[in-house]
Image: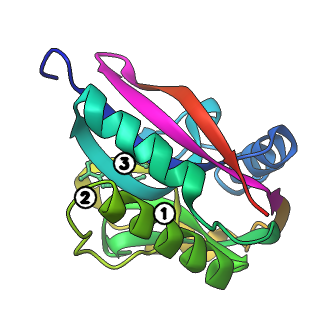
């Protein structure tokens, strides 16, 4: 990272209960461990908008824009079926999707995107695919049998705020620092 820049992203944080319930169910479904480099459960989150390396003035602008944003009312998500990007036969990312609440997550991502653009960030050109990354896999692997063995996780979680995070990249993996939270409703 370049001095003076912060690597920022906006995400939905997991509640402690959901984190523990998901960790239990992932462990039960994959007792031998996940392929690739699993994301440690304390780092699990759902990214709404990755902002990249940002100067202090950009961080101030995005804080102000998120403060002003209409983020909608709180809602509930159900963490459901696991999946893989770009595809299960050649998976680089193993994730869990939202069975219920995906439409609300899309609205929340759209509101976050609007705030980012009003703060001077360029439009995000990639479509938003709500997912919680469980593992990053290099080189890619076929995870079709693992996915077939993983039932929908069925963990229900309230979403009542979003968080601006700073990511610190290190040799032992990324660590995430909460900068500010923004309540829904
Ligand atoms: P991922 O979980 O799909 O890898 C912090 O790096 C978060 O921002 C991660 O959750 C990551 O998503 C997300 N992200 C989105 N676009 C990214 C990019 N271009 N580089 C790094 N992280 C990105």
Q: Secondary structure at mark 1?
A: helix
Magenta-highlighted residues: 158-174
Main secondary structure type of the part rendered in magenta: strand
Mark 3 — residue?
Answer: 136
Task: Please name the residue shown 39% across and 35% down the image.
Answer: 60
Q: In the picture, which quadrant includes the N terminus?
A: top left
Crowd class of label 1 (few under 14; some 14 to 19; many from 20; radius 10 Å): many
Task: Please name the residue shown 34% across and 62% down the image.
Answer: 118
Question: Nearest the camera: 178 or 36?
Answer: 178
Question: Does the stretch in magenta take in 162?
Answer: yes
Figure check: 25 above or below 90: above
The image quarter containing residue 55 is top left
Picture disc at residue 112: 1
Residue at the far bottom in the pictured view: 103
Picture disc at residue 32: none
Task: Please name the residue shown 35% across and 35% down the image.
Answer: 59
Nearer the observer, disc 3 or disc 1?
A: 1
Task: Please name the residue shown 26% across and 74% down the image.
Answer: 126
Residue at the far left in the pictured view: 2
Relative to 27, is 82 on the left or the right? left
Relative to 53, is 184 on the left or the right? right
Mark 2 — residue?
Answer: 140
Image coordinates of residue 85 in percent, x first then y, are 35, 70
Disc 3 Cβ-to-ligand 1 distance below 8 Å: yes
The image quarter containing residue 100 is bottom right
Q: Secondary structure at mark 3?
A: strand
Dot 2 or dot 1: first in sequence order is 1
Nearer the observer, disc 2 or disc 1?
A: 1
| Figure coloring | rainbow
């Amino acid at each position: 990272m370049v001095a003076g820049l912060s690597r920022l992203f906006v995400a939905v944080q997991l509640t402690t209960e959901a984190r523990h319930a998901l960790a239990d169910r992932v462990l039960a479904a994959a007792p031998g461990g996940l392929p690739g480099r699993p994301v440690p459960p304390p780092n699990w989150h759902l990214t709404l908008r990755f902002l990249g390396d940002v100067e202090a003035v950009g961080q101030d602008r995005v804080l102000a824009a998120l403060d002003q944003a209409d983020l909608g009312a709180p809602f509930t998500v159900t963490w459901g079926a696991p999946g893989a990007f770009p595809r299960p036969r050649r998976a680089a990312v193993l994730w869990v999707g939202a069975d219920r609440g995906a439409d609300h997550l899309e609205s929340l991502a759209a509101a976050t995107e609007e705030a980012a653009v009003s703060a001077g960030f360029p439009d995000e050109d990639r479509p938003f695919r709500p997912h919680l990354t469980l593992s990053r896999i290099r080189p890619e692997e076929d995870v079709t049998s693992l996915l077939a063995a993983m039932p929908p996780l069925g963990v229900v979680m309230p979403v009542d705020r979003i968080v601006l995070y700073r990511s610190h990249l290190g040799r032992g993996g990324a660590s995430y620092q909460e900068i500010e939270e923004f309540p829904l409703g």
